[in-house]
Image: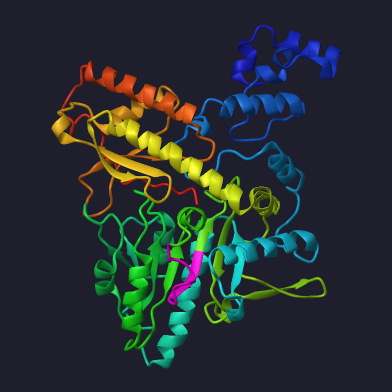
């Protein structure tokens, strides 16, 4: 018995009532509902499932509503049929391909479908796999580039064991998984700075960082901070020229966590994928604009040459051998099955309709925020459904975006305020990621709440200046990959 139990007058009476009524006790009339949830050790006695589930549901119900979390890329809605199908397959282990051959077959179908979307040439024997999320997919793409570089550098007579470490070239607007990759595998991270004119990586800004120790250039199809696409085609052309005389050819990994599942439907003419000769691997999140609950990601290599044999493990599958490249092992196959359901359910035109409508909502929000007349727009959902803005100093406001962030949370909206990365860290922005479950009605509700809270801040007494009334903030870290 806890101290809390001793102070409760009705504890013994509730226990006696439980013994008499058993499972028919109302949840909030039960003894179990009147004691504390375990924190550091297991409770001594079991609790009825209906009571345990309700207590946990109430506890997590105090946190933010996922549908109003406009800072996350991660999918927050699936059709009930999809959710039910995924629930029914939670027990299937994705790594056990021989035990669950039909599930493995659905994964292979997803791989082929995605390769087709990204214009892989089947004559080159492209490879691919599912992952837990796009972070694991990025890790695998980076590892393949590292292994390729080591083999080619040895042949070129480059000392791969010198103090001159291998490096990776990427925009300063990178996602944290790349920092993890570089730290874990001792890679020098060469950051290409952004500026107000170029909120993305260009060939002119990228190429000065490339040398014989570069394992790859990582091009982002959807920068985390702003949603902009790096100039993949321009970088590819620059690398084609560079590789003509390079001791070690440098290839591109496209981190398409968001854009790789938007561009094929919205901008099919945009060349960023395996149509470009130096794009050797692409990763994406199935649980972002792939429209599946977390966590599922995908990584593809353009050919067998692009994926070193040292990264491949072979497992038994239908009396033969199946290649597996995952870092993780045991995990539920339910997200893989969910991805196949969404592919089958939507088809190409269904995906196109969803992504176009999501962009329509984003453009509506852009116009509504611009009409307020006090913000500078940095991104207006020109490519993926992301909008990003800062507070115009000319507006003369005494409050900051951090204050607006706090006020919007009172309505349940989560809209992060954060500084931009190196070279632009003096600029504070807010960002909205529109997803399929954000309707035009809810977008109008948000704009109404935003306008009301701006009025409240204008009429409030703000202590301190815009630069001193808030605690120091670090760069926004969105790790939902």
Residue 22 in the image: x percent, y percent? 84, 17
Is the residue 271 above or below the residue 198 in the image?
below
Compared across the picture, whether 305 is left or right of 145 comes to: right
Compared across the picture, whether 38 is left or right of 374 comes to: right
Please tell me which residue is depicted at 34% across the width and 87% down the height of the picture: 244
Q: Is residue 353 visible?
A: yes
First to last magenta residue range:
270-282
Please tell me which residue is depicted at 73% across the width and 15% down the height of the picture: 30
Please tell me which residue is depicted at 68% across the width and 48% down the height of the picture: 345
Disc count in the image? Answer: 0
* Residue 276 is a magenta residue: yes
Q: Nearer the viewer, residue 292 or 366?
A: 366
Please tell me which residue is depicted at 65% across the width and 74% down the height of the picture: 313
Is the residue 364 above or below the residue 478 in the image?
above
Q: How is the image coloured?
A: rainbow
Instruction: Name the image quarter holding residue 183.
Output: bottom left
């Amino acid at each position: 018995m806890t101290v809390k139990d001793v102070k409760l007058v009705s504890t013994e009476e509730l226990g006696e009532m439980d013994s008499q009524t058993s499972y028919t006790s109302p949840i909030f009339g039960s003894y179990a509902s009147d004691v504390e949830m375990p924190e550091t050790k297991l409770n001594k006695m079991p609790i009825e499932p209906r009571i345990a589930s309700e207590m946990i549901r109430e506890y997590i119900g105090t946190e933010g509503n996922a549908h109003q979390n406009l800072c996350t890329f991660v999918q927050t809605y699936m059709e009930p049929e999809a959710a039910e199908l995924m629930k029914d397959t939670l027990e299937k282990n994705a790594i056990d391909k021989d035990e669950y051959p039909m599930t493995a077959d659905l994964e292979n179908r997803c791989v082929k479908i995605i390769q087709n979307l990204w214009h892989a040439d089947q004559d080159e024997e492209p490879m691919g796999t599912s992952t837990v999320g796009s972070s694991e997919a990025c890790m695998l793409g980076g590892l393949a580039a590292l292994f390729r570089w080591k083999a080619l550098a040895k042949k070129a007579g480059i000392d791969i064991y010198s103090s001159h470490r291998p490096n990776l070239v990427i925009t300063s607007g990178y996602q944290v998984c790349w920092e993890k990759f570089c730290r874990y595998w001792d890679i020098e991270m060469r950051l290409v700075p952004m500026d107000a004119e170029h909120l993305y990586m260009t060939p002119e800004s990228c190429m000065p960082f490339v040398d014989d120790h570069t394992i790859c250039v990582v091009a982002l199809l959807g920068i985390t901070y702003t949603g902009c696409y790096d100039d993949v085609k321009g970088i590819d052309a620059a690398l084609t020229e560079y590789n003509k005389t390079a001791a070690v050819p440098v290839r591109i990994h496209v981190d398409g966590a968001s854009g790789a599942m938007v561009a094929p439907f919205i901008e099919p003419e945009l060349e960023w994928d395996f149509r470009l000769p130096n794009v050797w691997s692409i990763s994406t999140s199935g649980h972002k604009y792939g429209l599946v609950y977390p966590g599922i990601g995908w990584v593809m290599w353009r050919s067998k040459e692009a994926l070193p044999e040292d990264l491949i493990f072979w497992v038994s599958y239908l009396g033969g051998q199946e290649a597996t490249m995952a870092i993780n092992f045991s995990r539920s196959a339910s997200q893989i099955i969910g991805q196949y359901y969404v592919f089958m359910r939507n088809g190409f035109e269904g995906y196109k309709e969803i992504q176009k409508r999501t962009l329509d909502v984003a453009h509506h929000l852009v116009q509504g925020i611009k009409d307020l007349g006090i913000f500078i727009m940095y991104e207006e959902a020109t490519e993926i459904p992301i909008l990003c803005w800062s507070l115009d100093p000319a507006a003369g406001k005494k409050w900051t975006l951090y204050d607006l962030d706090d006020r919007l949370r009172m309505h349940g909206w989560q809209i992060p305020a954060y500084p931009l990365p190196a070279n632009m860290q003096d600029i504070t922005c807010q960002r909205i990621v529109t997803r399929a479950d954000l309707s035009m009605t809810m977008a109008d509700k948000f704009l109404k709440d935003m306008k009301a809270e701006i009025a409240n801040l204008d009429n409030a007494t703000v202590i301190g200046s815009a630069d001193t009334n808030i605690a120091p903030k670090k760069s926004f870290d969105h790790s939902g990959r």
